[in-house]
Image (tube, grey):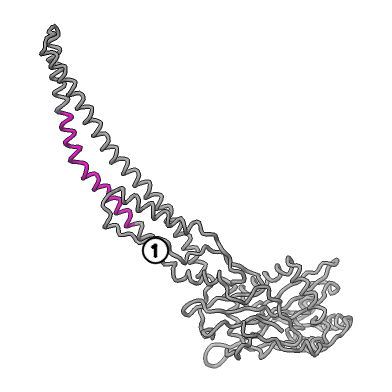
Amino acid sequence: MEPRENEPVVPASVTHPILLDVGPSMEQSVPEDYVLASLLLRTLQVRDANELEFILKGYLPIVIEPGGAGQLVLMERVGLSAVSFTPVSEYPVRDIDFSEISSADHLLSAIESLVKDLSEVERKERISVLGLLQGEMAEGVMATLNLPTLSSVENYAVEIPSVLEAEKNDPLSQLLSTAYDIHRSRELIELLGRVERAVQEALEGETKGHSPTIQRLTMRIERLEREISTIQSRIQAMEDDLGPRRRELGDLLKNRQKALKRDLKRRAELTQRNRSASEALHRAFERLRDSVDRTTGIYQEVEQQLHQILVDSEDVPVSEGPLSLLLPVYLIGFSKKGVLEVEVLPPLHYQETGQRVGLMREFVDTLTPMNEGLVKLASRLEEAIDRNPSLMQDIRLFSRTKNLLALENTQEMIREGGSLLLAEGVARESMIQKMEGLLRGIPIRKVDAQEQEALIIPEDGSGTK
């Protein structure tokens, strides 16, 4: 695929495989007259001919942009899809050397700082990238780059109007820059492990630091309790003695009891401090663990989204800028009780079934969607036409000038295609006659010279006439 500068890639709308003696099979375009006749007969077989209003051939504008080393992103310009994500390209967590933290209080402060940093990621509002294709849809569109291409768009075709600007997409840039930062989620998990070890070491250090003091206090408390017991016994033995000696023992008892009370309080404070420090660190660590879990969840979600939107570039020439692609679709309009219903068909694949018409079968459909991703994209376009009055109005306007059932040249193509279907044995004469009756009842119009201008892609990457 070698598109000329500033020109779009225009894949064939319907192809079939050609088996080669050497190497893999290759795709070849199916004649448009065969395709148009087949689509019309398929429609007449399942719908009331009186409901059929038009058949259009349209092109959905898509831009393919570099998305990193050897990868691409695909953006459709009609606004059929969107990806919502949390921007996490700026990694807010400060670098902390836990080996320099000497106390539980300092560690507690460091953990609280980390939780605050991570909350910045959690508080970031999600943003959306409109038009971004992902998953099956992106892969489905990429598959069309391996198809034969047209040198220009047919004079009877239309381009689905773009509603998204082709300018630099800041949300997309943020999402792509995230591709270089999603590994940070692994760093957060490693960080959590370092903090847990630091908490254990800090608690052990606090305990060891206070243990000698608590042990000394305990020994003093035990000695004071013994002394108090002895003094109380001596006072009781001197029950009838009200002299100076008893008063002296009474004062000594008060002093010992006061010292005991002071040491008990001091020991309780140290024990409580150890317990409080332990509980505070454990609570802070659990808050950090929860915050890390939520933040890594955000990173992993974005990582999964990037996996869905980034596709391998293969041989797509986008190194010097975006590549424009016009994806062919067929739009079939039905009018029932004044309500317009539009069916959208994606690029198709000719499939030889080996079946032929007979007494109970008037038509054998040989065209199937190229892949499921394109089916999903076509379904999105159907939904957009149905819910967007402006887009529906554009389709109505196109149908007045580019209805393939009414244009002189496409009517002739349909008739020639009918002859091919008849000769192949996949359409009965009765269906051809039904098709002919429909065409004769539609006023013929010609494509104006102004309408025959080929669609080109200017330097900004947007499709226009």
The one of 167 and 20 positioned closer to us in this rendering: 167
The one of 76 and 274 positioned closer to us in this rendering: 274
Residue 280 x/y as whole percent:
35, 44
Near mark 1 (Cα within 10 A), the count class, few <14, some 14-19 or many ≥20, is: few
Assign a secondary structure to mark 1. Answer: helix
Task: Left or right? Give the position of 333 relative to 13.
Answer: right
Residue 149 x/y as whole percent:
63, 88
Residue 447's place in the image compared with 128, above or below, is below
Q: Residue furthest bottom?
A: 21
Where's the N terminus, which quadrant? Answer: bottom right
Residue 352's place in the image compared with 282, above or below, is below
Residue 347 belongs to magenta span: no
Residue 135's place in the image compared with 58, above or below, is above
Q: Which residue lies furthest to the front in this view?
A: 244
Residue 347 x/y as whole percent:
66, 79
User: Badge 1 is on which residue?
Assistant: 186
Where's the C terminus, which quadrant? Answer: bottom right
Q: State whether residue 213 appears in this view.
A: yes
**Which quarter of the figure has residue 400?**
bottom right
Measuring 21% from the left and 25% from the top, which residue is drawn there?
258
Secondary structure mostly taken by the magenta-highlighted segment of the chain: helix
Range covered by the magenta-colored residues:
193-222
- Tag 1: residue type? Arg
